[in-house]
């Protein structure tokens, strides 16, 4: 049985984060952060620990930085995957597939 502790963060949640979101919008997506500092109110830290039977615990962190109460940047083990970045990565991978191995779609040119 897996044991998860800390914030329950997954990739779908992180993918919803966009620069310019307010702290309240981020909180609705991510929940309240595991760690906040009275000295650094513009940084929220989320920690997730997962322990699987007979394995060491895996710890992932996510730090969100705000400026003027809006999300400025994301650091840590989780990063959002923008759709256009995924499309670009997919196109790059497709370039490495030999032409004769590409699936042909009727009415569409491959190239």
Image (tube, rainbow, N blue to C red):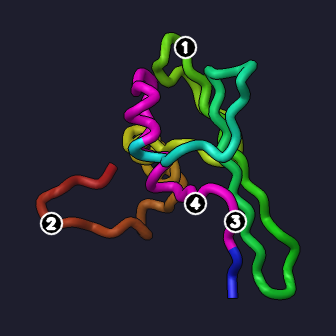
How far apart, in angstroms, are the residues tagged by discs 2 and 4? Answer: 44 Å
Residue furthest front as drawn: 38
Q: Residue furthest top?
A: 68
What residue is pinned by disc 4?
Answer: 8
Q: Residue at x 62, y 56 (%)?
A: 7
Disc number lying in front (2 or 3): 3
Q: Is residue 27 above or below residue 102?
A: above
**Residue sitting nearer the eye, 82 or 111:** 82
Could you tell which of marks 4 and 1 lies nearer the N-terminus? 4
Between the residue at mark 4 and the residue at mark 1, the CA separation in whole angstroms equals 25 Å
Quadrant containing the N terminus in the rendered view: bottom right
Q: Position of residue 52 (x, y in %)?
A: 76, 80
Q: Which secondary structure, mark 3?
A: strand
Question: Which residues, given as a range, are shown in magenta?
Answer: 4-27
- Residue labelled with disc 3: 5
Q: Which residue is mark 2?
A: 106
15 sits to left or right of 40: left
What is the C-alpha distance between the residues marked 1 and 3? 29 Å
Q: Nearer the viewer, residue 17 or 40?
A: 40
Mark 1 or mark 3, whichever is nearer to me: 3
Image-quadrant location for residue 56: bottom right
Query: Do tag 2 and tag 4 residues touch (Cβ < 8 Å)?
Result: no
Crowdedness of circle 2 by 10 Å Cα count: few (<14), some, many (20+)?
few
Sequence order check, earlier mark of 2 and 4? 4
The residue to which callout 1 is attached is 67
């Amino acid at each position: 049985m897996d044991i998860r502790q800390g914030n329950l963060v997954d990739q779908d949640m992180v993918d919803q984060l966009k620069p310019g979101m307010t702290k309240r919008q981020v909180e609705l997506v991510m929940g309240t952060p595991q760690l906040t500092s009275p000295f650094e109110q513009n940084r929220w830290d989320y920690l997730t620990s997962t322990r699987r039977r007979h394995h060491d615990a895996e710890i992932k962190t996510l730090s969100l930085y705000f400026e003027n109460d809006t999300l400025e940047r994301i650091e840590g083990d989780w990063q959002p995957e923008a759709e256009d970045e995924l499309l670009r990565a997919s196109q790059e991978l497709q370039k490495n597939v030999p032409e004769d191995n590409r699936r042909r779609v009727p009415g569409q040119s491959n190239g």
